[in-house]
Amino acid sequence: MSLSSIPADWIFGLAGGLVIGLSAAVLLLGNARILGASGILGSVVEGSEPDTTTERLWFLGALVGAPAIAVVIFGAPQTHVSGNLPLLVIAGLMVGLGTRLANGCTSGHGVCGMSRFSTRSIVSTLVYLAAGFAVMAVARHILGVL
Amino acid sequence: MRNLISAVSGGLFGLGLLISGMTDTAKVQGWLDLFGDWDPTLAFVLGGAILPMLLAWRIAPRRKVSVTGVAFPTMPRQVIDGRLLAGSALFGAGWALAGFCPGPALASITWGGLGGLTLLLAMIGGMIVSSLAGKRRLAAA
């Protein structure tokens, strides 16, 4: 298999993934914090751990700001956000509640926890992947709503 | 210094999500669509992200403290309870329905339109519900 036959999306995925991993390594080795998007946003929303709220706001600001600047320079990437607002409200509530109950999401459990061989994170990742596969199968191929 | 490190990390995280294509809901939903036109990109993203962290988790115990002098977080007690399982299942279901997990929902908010904003606000609403439920449990205990 020659290099040019590898889909560009996979190469961008791997490159972007490495940058995501680098960002988590910077936060761990720099600040001794585990990068979890749901935990960082959730703790700011809750107002828990008030002495580190400022640094988490810096994180969130840059998380929104850096891609926004890139998009101004290079143009907006493709996205396919559903136009079904009630569906998005239900999905958002599930993601918000679920990630807080599970104490983590794709970044916290999937990236930081799995790379540490945490049993909780491996179990969580297997469960949210299985639930995602199952809901996608039912919603798209049986109910036809996605 | 801590704020600067947080900002650098947050910025890299956002750019990584953008480069990887994970801000496109169709890529995420394509990964979850095992019985349709399956898109394996997310596996490359997750694999790529885990590599630097495998290294970081090896460096951390040797240095004992972070650059800013804080002790590294200890491994939490490995309890698999209903809360972890139910929360993960709920998250996975919502992830499939919208094609968004929390990181990309934040990163793409400036170009995600009304749908992206709706999803993010509902997600924050879900986090508030979880917080209120937790406080009620504490009060009842």
Image (cartoon, rainbow, N blue to C red):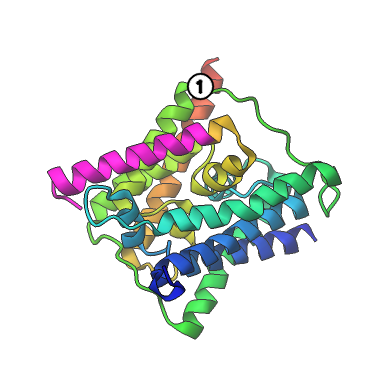
Q: Nearer the viewer, residue A15 or A54?
A: A15
Magenta stretch secondary structure, dominant: helix
Up the image or down, A18 lies above or below B138; here it is below
Query: Relative to the observer, which residue lies in front, A12 or A59?
Result: A12
Q: Is residue B120 magenta-colored?
A: no
Q: Quadrant of the N terminus of chain A?
A: bottom left
Q: In the picture provided, is B32 more to the left or to the right than B52?
A: left
Q: Is residue A145 magenta?
A: yes
Chain letter of mark 1 equals: B
Which is nearer the eye, B140 or A2? Answer: A2
| Left or right of residue A55: residue B86 | left
Percent position of residue A97, x then y:
43, 38
Measured as percent of width and height from the top left, residue B101 is found at 43, 51
Residue drawn at (69%, 45%) of the image:
A50
Label 1 sits on a secondary structure element that is helix
The stretch of residues the image draws in magenta is A122-146
Mark 1 is on which residue type?
Arg
Residue A118 placement, left or right of B121:
right
- The residue labelled by disc 1 is B137
